[in-house]
């Protein structure tokens, strides 16, 4: 009863009284469902991008660092950690009372090659790599103990067929690198939530692999709090049914589900590959960049309808979803302007290049007020 009253006063009343000029904020509209997060960049957490900061402070209650906590940024050389960016990021999160996410401890991209090599360039031994992994995780997680509330411990360990991806981590350490990474993170901050994060888990073979992997970790007593579904979506993928089944399948194994990198790409597919492998790079051609001078209303509307459909599924599963995080704040910030083709004009988020709310914003907001 109390919650309901709070919802009416804080969300519905402002909308009804002030009309569209002063709409509810996303984080308030979904307060009884899940956190609403954004991945933020250097210009934002250092408060250069004031328009971005205003949107972040008003609309979101969780942040993820786009790059500064990736290995190459925070630990560029064997004996050198660089916490300048990440310290600012965490301070920014605290200043604006955000649920602060760490992204990411173990990945095969944006990780320097020295990590896997000795000073002569030869591959290091299993034990040496485990030592490096432990030092890295203890140093980084330990520094922000109690402040960063959740960590993407391992990012993208699976191939599309659901088998473990043959990364240097896998080749040198073997499957145990996953267990170890979670153990080291748990030792460094026993209170932090630990996540497994990946893309295309809506596709069945990969989803099965993830479920198997998480069950194995659970059987070893590893506290996996949630799976992160990155959510780099298209207008037609994943289907509503796939999205729904994916969340339900992970909920069945007793973990939470977070949507961690949500965006909806409206541009033509540049490759057959529909994943989110960041190493792809396709040459720019005019037909791959059809909306360079603006998004037609019809596509704007398709995007809004698509976001509404996705959020209806998220709302349905709000008991198992803790957080929905967008990968960027405005369309201008999105990685999709440069991936998998450099220099395109993309429209994947809820705020346009001028920081204005798009029809997709209203569509998402209206899902919150529907039930
Ligand atoms: C992956 C990673 C993110 C980011 C995006 C695209 O999904 O998890 O850190 O690099 O690719 O930018």
Image (tube, rainbow, N blue to C red):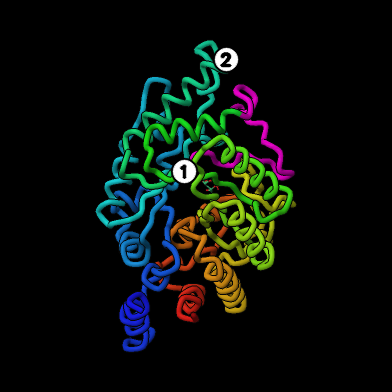
**Quarter of the image where the N terminus is located:** bottom left
| Ligand 1 under 8 Å from disc 1 Cβ | no
Residue sitting farthest toward the left: 95
Residue 213 on image: x %, y %: 63, 40
Residue 275 on image: x %, y %: 66, 50
Gap in angstroms between the C-alphas marked 1 and 2: 27 Å
Numbered disc 1: secondary structure: strand
234 horizontally vs 144: left or right: right
**Residue range corresponding to the magenta coloring:** 152-175
Categorize mark 2 by other alpha carbons within 10 Å: few (<14), some (14-19), many (20+). Answer: some
Please check the rendered image and state whether residue 166 is part of the magenta-colored stretch, yes or no.
yes
146 horizontally vs 168: left or right: left
Numbered disc 2: secondary structure: loop
Seen from the viewer's position, the closer of residues 321 and 118 is 321
Compared to residue 97, the image places residue 365 above or below, namely below
- Which numbered disc flags the more N-terminal residue, 1 or 2? 2
Q: Which residue occupies 65% across, 52% down?
A: 200
Residue 295 on image: x %, y %: 56, 71
Q: Which residue occupies 70% across, 54% down?
A: 203
Q: Which residue occupies 56% across, 15% down?
A: 124
Do the numbered discs 1 and 2 sit on residues whose CB atoms are within 8 Å?
no
Task: Examine the rendering and report whether any part of residue 43 can be seen.
Answer: yes
Q: Which residue was labeled with disc 2?
A: 125
Q: Which residue was labeled with disc 1?
A: 194
Seen from the viewer's position, the closer of residues 271 and 306 is 306
Seen from the viewer's position, the closer of residues 115 and 252 is 252
């Amino acid at each position: 009863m109390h919650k309901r009253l709070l919802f009416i006063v804080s969300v519905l009343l402002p909308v009804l009284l002030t009309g569209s000029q002063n709409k509810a904020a996303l984080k308030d509209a979904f307060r009884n469902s899940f956190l609403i997060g954004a991945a933020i960049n250097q210009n934002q957490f250092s408060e250069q991008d004031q328009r971005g900061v205003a949107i972040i402070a008003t609309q979101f209650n969780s942040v993820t660092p786009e790059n500064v906590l990736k290995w190459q940024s925070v630990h560029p050389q064997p004996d050198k950690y660089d916490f300048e960016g990440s310290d600012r990021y965490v301070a920014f999160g605290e200043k604006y009372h955000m649920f602060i996410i760490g992204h990411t401890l173990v990945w095969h991209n944006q990780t320097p090659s020295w990590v896997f090599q000795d000073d002569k360039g030869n591959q290091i031994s299993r034990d040496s790599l485990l030592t490096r992994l432990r030092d890295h995780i203890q140093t980084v997680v330990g520094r922000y103990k109690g402040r960063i509330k959740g960590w993407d411990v391992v990012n993208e360990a699976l191939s599309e067929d659901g088998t473990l991806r043959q990364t240097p981590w896998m080749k040198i350490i073997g499957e145990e690198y996953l267990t170890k990474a979670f153990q080291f993170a748990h030792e460094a901050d026993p209170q932090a939530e630990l996540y497994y994060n990946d893309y295309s888990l809506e596709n069945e073979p990969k989803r099965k692999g993830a479920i198997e992997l998480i069950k194995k970790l659970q059987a070893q007593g590893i506290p996996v709090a949630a799976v992160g579904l990155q959510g780099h979506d298209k207008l037609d993928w994943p289907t509503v049914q796939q999205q729904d089944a994916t969340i339900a399948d992970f909920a069945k194994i007793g973990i939470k589900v977070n949507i961690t990198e949500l965006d909806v790409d409206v541009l033509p597919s540049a490759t057959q590959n529909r994943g989110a492998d960041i190493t792809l790079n396709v040459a720019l051609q005019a037909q791959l960049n059809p909306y360079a001078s603006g998004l037609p209303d019809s596509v704007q509307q398709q995007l809004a309808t698509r976001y509404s459909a996705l959020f209806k599924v998220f709302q349905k599963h709000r008991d198992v979803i803790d957080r929905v995080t967008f990968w960027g704040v405005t369309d201008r910030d999105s990685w999709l302007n440069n991936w998998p083709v450099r220099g395109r004009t993309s429209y994947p988020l809820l705020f346009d290049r001028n920081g204005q709310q798009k029809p997709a914003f209203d569509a998402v907001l209206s899902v919150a007020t529907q039930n």
